[in-house]
């Protein structure tokens, strides 16, 4: 951040930060999501990752509720740690 402050005047800083986040976010988001992919596969959940989004496809049946809840808990816990 300090390098950006030194290079750009304050009125342009938010634009520069937004552009940085846009490009870094699109390249780093899939890496951030990698652990979730293995969790989803373990529970037989289909998914598709885009540059800045992950779509989860869940065929919902009453008997699958425990598996889905457990997967959700594991995925949330893995992102905190």
Image: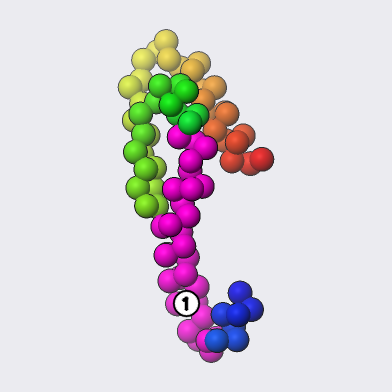
Instruction: Please tell me in which quadrant of the rendered image residue 49 appears.
Output: top left
- Looking at the image, the residue that sits furthest to the bottom is 9
Residue of label 1: 16
Q: Residue at x 50, y 16 (%)?
A: 66
Q: Residue at x 41, y 57 (%)?
A: 26
| 46 sits left or right of 34 in the view | left
| 9 sits left or right of 19 in the view | right
Q: Residue at x 44, y 48 (%)?
A: 30
Quarter that holds the N terminus:
bottom right
Span of residues in magenta: 8-37
Position of residue 46 measured from the top left corner of the image (x, y, whole percent): 35, 29
Is disc 1 surrounded by few (<14), some (14 to 19) or many (20+) residues within 10 Å?
some
Q: Majority secondary structure of the magenta segment?
A: helix
Of residues 60 and 38, the one drawn nearer to the viewer in this rendering: 38
- Mark 1 element type: helix
Is 74 located above or below residue 1 in the figure?
Answer: above
| Magenta stretch: includes residue 14 | yes
Query: How many dots with numbers?
Result: 1
Position of residue 72 measured from the top left corner of the image (x, y, whole percent): 52, 29
Position of residue 48 measured from the top left corner of the image (x, y, whole percent): 34, 38
Quarter that holds the C terminus:
top right
Display coloring: rainbow
Position of residue 73 measured from the top left corner of the image (x, y, whole percent): 57, 28
């Amino acid at each position: 951040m300090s390098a950006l402050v030194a290079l750009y005047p304050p009125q342009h800083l938010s634009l520069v930060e937004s552009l940085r986040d846009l490009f870094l976010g699109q390249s780093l988001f899939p890496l951030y999501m990698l652990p979730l992919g293995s969790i989803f596969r373990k529970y037989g959940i289909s998914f598709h990752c885009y540059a800045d989004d992950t779509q989860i496809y869940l065929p919902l049946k009453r008997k699958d509720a425990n598996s889905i809840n457990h997967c959700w808990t594991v995925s949330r816990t893995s992102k905190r740690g």
